[in-house]
Image (cartoon, grey):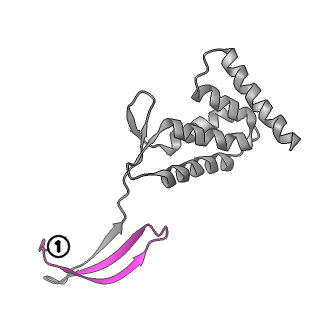
Amino acid sequence: MKCPKCQHNSTSKVIESRPLADGAQIRRRRQCEHCGYRFTTFEMVEVTPLLVVKKNGTRQEFNREKLLRGIIRSCEKRPVSLEQMNQIVDQTRKNIESQDNGSHEVSSAIIGENVMNGLKDIDEIAYIRFASVYRQFKDMNEFYVKMKELMDNDASQDDE
């Protein structure tokens, strides 16, 4: 490590180490063995960004806020709390990370399915709204088929 004062490239001695509040970083007090100057460094794990492969083949970095905005739009005027919406986003991210095979890429289809599964358990109207945008229903018939499928699932669960 290069000393910020004398610019000497010698080793520095670690005097004190402690994790920061979030536990994702370590603060270290160091002392240059050449000039004796003390300075602070911060160490953290380098995280490779998660890339989303869109339907058209383009890639973009996973954006938690963008996903949350889409869920918020589908939940407008519905009894779904912001906490529940955040939980859907967090659970979706956990599911993606647990399925990661080292490529650090995920299909937007997998993200959409995860969100729909989360919404289905919380609010069926929000689920249908999200599905109508995500699945890009072409006409009322496609929309009706999905609604009927959802109602049939509910009826079969009520019989159990």
User: What is the quadrant of the N terminus in the image?
Assistant: bottom left
Q: Position of residue 63 (x, y in %)?
A: 47, 43
Residue at image coords 58%, 29%: 134
Q: Position of residue 82 (x, y in %)?
A: 67, 46
Count of number-bearing discs: 1
Q: Classify residue 115 by image quadrant.
A: top right
User: Foreground: 8 or 158?
Assistant: 158
Say which amino acid is labelled 1.
Answer: Lys
- Whether residue 85 is visible, yes or no, is yes
User: Foreground: 127 or 11?
Assistant: 127
User: Foreground: 153 or 108?
Assistant: 153
From this view, report whether residue 20 is shown above or below residue 91: below
- Whether residue 76 is visible, yes or no, is no
From this view, report whether residue 60 is shown above or below residue 2: above
Q: Is 1 positioned to the left or the right of 63 in the image?
A: left
**Residue 6 on the magenta segment:** yes
Point out the residue furthest to the right here. Answer: 159
**Residue 29 on the magenta segment:** yes
Secondary structure type for disc 1: loop
Q: Residues within 10 Å of mark 1 (few under 14, many from 20)?
A: few
Residue range (magenta)? 5-31
Q: Classify residue 8 by image quadrant.
A: bottom left
Q: Is 97 positioned to the left or the right of 15 in the image?
A: right
User: What is the quadrant of the C terminus in the image?
Assistant: top right
Residue at image coords 17%, 79%: 11
Q: Label 1 belongs to which residue?
A: 5
Residue at image coords 55%, 51%: 95
Q: Is 20 positioned to the left or the right of 95 in the image?
A: left
From this view, report whether residue 91 is shown above or below residue 128: below
